[in-house]
Amino acid sequence: MHDFVLIHAALADENRLRLLHLLRSGERCVCQLQGVLHTNQPKISRHLAYLRKAGLVEARQDGKWAHYRLKKLPAHLAGIRDQTLEKLAAQPQIVDDLRRLQQINCNPARYKVPSPLRVAPSATPKKAAKPTPVKARMP
């Protein structure tokens, strides 16, 4: 009974449903999930921790990067998760999330570390830092 309670509690949050739906197509880096949901890393991590506690997702570390994927579940629990996510597939927010996911690259090269996903760094040049204005001193 405890499993059912945890799973239903995990599925009772819009952000967790969005995260689970994004993970349906495979493993994702937290930075990708942040980009799609337009929120900060602590909030994403808190929701992912809740999903882990409920047994719905599992994670692996690759250096500083955490990657999440759907966990293989017993058939009766997988059915609950999969039917719920299937019913959401046509929702405008979910469709928009999947579109945005296609535009986001995990690009740790900007931090001068190798990519955990083996994705080539983006070809967009870095923006130059704005010069800091210097205040004139009064005599």
Image (spheres, grey):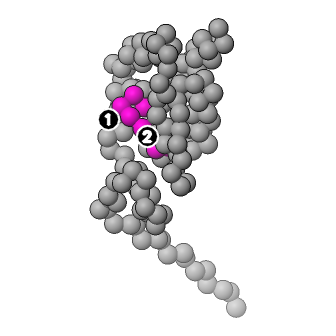
Where's the C terminus, which quadrant?
bottom right
Q: Give the amino acid type for the residue marked by disc 2 in the picture.
A: Arg
Which span of residues is magenta-colored? 23-30
Is 16 on the left-hand or right-hand side of 128? right
> Mark 2, mark 1: which one is toward the viewer?
2
Instruction: Tell me the residue that label 2 is attached to.
Output: 28
Corner quadrant of residue 98: top left
Asked whether 14 falls inside the magenta stretch, the response is no
Quarter of the image for the N terminus: give it. Answer: top right
Instruction: Judge from the rendering whether residue 2 lies leftward or rightward of residue 100; answer left or right.
Output: right
Label 1 crowd (10 A; few <14 / some 14-19 / many >=20) = few
Q: Is residue 25 magenta?
A: yes
Q: Residues within 10 Å of mark 2 (few under 14, many from 20)?
A: many
Q: Residue at x 60, y 11 (%)?
A: 4
Q: As displayed, is residue 14 above or below residue 98?
A: above
Q: Residue furthest right?
A: 139
Residue lying at the far front in this picture: please name it.
Answer: 74
Q: Amino acid at mark 1?
A: Arg
For the residues labelled 2 and 1, the Cα–Cα distance comes to 15 Å
Question: In terms of sequence position, does the residue under pointer 2 or pointer 1 come before the other?
Answer: 2
Secondary structure at badge 2 equals strand
Name which residue lies at 46% across and 67% down: 112
In the drawing, what numbered circle is on residue 137? none
Q: Are marks 2 and 1 in contact (CB under 8 Å)?
A: no
Pointer 1 residue: 99
Q: Position of residue 110 (x, y in %)?
A: 43, 63
- Residue 70: image location, x then y, percent: 46, 29
Residue 43, position in %: x, y? 60, 38
Which residue is at the front of the view, 40 or 83?
83
